[in-house]
C-alpha cells in the first residue's frame, strides 16, 4: 500500500534538516515544565515535548502526571510560542490532547506493537488534521511499523512521520535499545517521502551517547531529532540517565555536521561506479562459491554424509572473522555475512540431497 502523505510544515519552523523536538521525558511539575520550555525556547527550539502518560515496564514507578499536565503544556504555548507534542496510547488520550490544543502527537513503541491499540487511536483521530509521528515497535518488525502508519493514514491523516528509537534486546551491551539502522533505512527506501526522526535518548539510554547518535542519524540522512531535555536531569522522575540540560542540547546541536543528502558530484559518481563494479565481482564470486557448494552437496549425497558439518562451519566463521579484522572490518559483521552465505549453501545442499 502506498501512503497518501503531505509534508509536516509548521509556521515558524525551518524546513531545513534537522527538525528538533525537545523536552523532558515526563511532565513532572508545572515549574519543571515551564523552566525547561523557557530554556529551550531561548536556545531556539520551536517544538516542546513532554510525556503526560508514562506507563512503565513495571508498576510502581512514576507513570505520568496525567491530564493536569496538559494545562502546563497550554501555558508553554502561551508563554513561549512553542508548538507542543506528547504521546498518546488510547482514544481517551487523543480526546484529551485535542481538547487541550496539543499540536503534535506521537505513538509510542509499546503501542505501535499492538494493532488493536493503534486502530483505536486511528478511529479517535478520524476527521482530525494533526501531525502524528509513529515510533518503531519494541521489536525489529518493519511490517508492524508500516502497518501502524497505514492505520493512521487510513483514518484520513496525511501529515505523518516516523520516529526511530531503537529495538529492545535481552542482551544489553552499549545501547539501551539497539539502533539496527538498516531498519529505518529500509523504511526510507519503502516510503521515500516519510519524514523520519531519530530518538537518541531511548537508543542510547545514557546521556554521553546522545551526541554521537545525533551525528550518526544526520549522516544517515534522517530528517530530525527528538531529544529528552530536562532543566535538572539528575533529579528527573523518569529516565534520568538519558536526559540532558538545554545548554548541553544546544552545545550538541551546534556541533552537528549536516551533510548534503542528494547533490551528487562527478567524483562521487565515479566512486559509485567503482562500487557497482565491486558488487558485480562479489556476485560472480558468490555464484562460483555456490557452484562449489552444490558439488560438495552431491559428494555428501553419494557418501551418505550429513549436510551440516559443525566443526567446519565454526572454523570458517572464526577464520573469516579474524581476516575481516585484519582488513579493517568488524569481526561480527564478517561473521554475519558468512552466516548468511552458509545458510544459503545449506539450503542448496539440502535441495540436492533430497532430490
Image: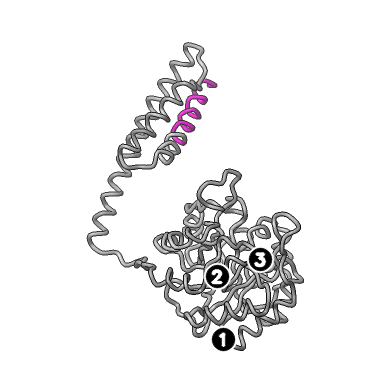
Q: Earlier in the sequence, mark 1 or mark 2?
A: 1
Q: Is residue 315 left or right of residue 29?
A: left
Query: Between tags 2 and 3, which lies in front?
Result: 3
Q: Residues within 10 Å of mark 3 (few under 14, many from 20)?
A: some
Residue 160 picture location, percent across and down? 57, 70
In the image, residue 136 sits, relative to residue 21, either above or below, namely: above
Q: Is residue 242 magenta?
A: no
Instruction: Read off the residue under disc 2.
Output: 229
Q: Main secondary structure of the magenta part?
A: helix
Identify the residue shown where x is 31% and y is 67%: 263
Q: Earlier in the sequence, mark 2 or mark 3?
A: 2
Q: Residues within 10 Å of mark 1 (few under 14, many from 20)?
A: some
Classify mark 3: helix, strand or loop. Answer: loop
Instruction: Read off the residue under disc 3.
Output: 237
Residue span colored magenta:
340-355
Measure how far apart labels 1 and 2 are at the Cα level: 16 Å
Identify the residue shown where x is 54% and y is 72%: 22
Q: Which numbered dot is residue 80? A: 1
Decide which of 162, 59 is in the foreground and name it.
Answer: 59
Residue 258 picture location, percent across and down? 37, 68
Q: Residues within 10 Å of mark 2 (few under 14, many from 20)?
A: many
Does residue 153 appear anywhere in the picture?
no
Residue 120 picture location, percent across and down? 74, 65
Position of the N terminus by quadrant: bottom right
Residue 214 picture location, percent across and down? 45, 63
Amino acid at each position: 500500500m502506498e501512503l497518501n502523505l503531505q509534508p509536516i510544515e509548521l509556521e515558524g519552523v525551518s524546513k531545513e534538516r534537522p527538525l528538533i523536538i525537545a523536552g523532558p521525558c515526563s511532565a513532572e511539575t508545572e515549574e519543571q515544565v515551564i523552566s525547561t520550555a523557557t530554556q529551550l525556547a531561548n536556545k531556539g527550539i520551536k517544538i516542546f515535548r513532554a510525556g503526560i502518560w508514562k506507563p512503565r515496564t513495571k508498576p510502581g514507578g512514576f507513570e505520568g502526571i496525567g491530564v493536569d499536565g496538559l494545562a502546563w503544556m497550554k501555558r508553554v504555548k502561551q508563554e513561549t510560542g512553542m508548538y507542543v507534542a506528547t504521546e498518546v496510547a488510547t482514544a481517551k488520550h487523543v480526546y484529551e490532547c485535542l481538547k487541550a490544543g496539543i499540536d503534535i502527537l506521537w505513538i509510542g513503541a509499546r503501542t505501535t506493537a499492538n494493532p488493536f491499540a493503534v486502530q483505536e487511536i486511528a478511529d479517535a483521530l478520524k476527521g482530525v488534521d494533526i501531525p502524528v509521528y509513529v515510533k518503531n515497535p519494541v521489536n525489529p518488525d518493519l511490517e508492524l511499523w508500516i502497518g501502524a502508519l497505514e492505520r493512521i493514514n487510513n483514518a484520513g491523516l496525511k501529515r505523518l512521520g516516523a520516529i526511530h528509537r531503537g529495538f529492545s534486546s535481552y542482551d544489553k551491551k552499549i545501547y539501551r535499545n539497539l539502533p539496527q539502522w538498516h531498519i529505518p533505512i529500509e523504511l526510507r527506501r519503502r516510503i521515500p517521502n516519510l519524514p523520519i526522526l531519530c530518538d537518541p535518548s531511548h537508543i542510547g539510554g545514557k546521556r554521553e551517547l546522545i551526541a554521537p547518535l545525533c551525528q550518526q542519524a544526520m549522516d544517515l540522512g534522517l530528517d530530525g531529532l527528538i531529544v529528552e531535555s530536562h532543566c535538572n536531569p539528575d533529579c528527573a522522575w523518569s529516565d534520568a540517565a538519558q536526559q540532558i540540560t538545554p545548554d548541553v542540547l544546544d552545545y550538541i546541536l551546534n556541533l552537528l555536521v549536516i551533510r548534503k543528502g542528494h547533490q551528487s558530484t562527478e567524483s562521487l559518481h565515479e566512486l559509485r561506479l567503482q562500487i557497482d563494479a565491486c558488487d558485480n565481482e562479489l556476485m560472480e564470486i558468490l555464484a562460483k562459491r555456490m557452484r562449489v557448494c552444490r558439488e560438495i552437496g552431491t559428494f555428501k549425497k553419494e557418501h551418505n554424509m550429513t549436510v551440516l558439518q559443525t566443526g567446519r562451519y565454526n572454523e570458517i566463521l572464526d577464520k573469516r572473522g579474524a581476516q575481516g579484522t585484519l582488513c579493517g572490518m568488524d569481526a561480527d559483521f564478517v561473521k554475519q555475512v558468512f552466516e548468511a552465505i552458509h545458510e544459503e549453501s545449506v539450503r542448496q545442499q539440502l535441495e540436492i540431497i533430497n532430490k
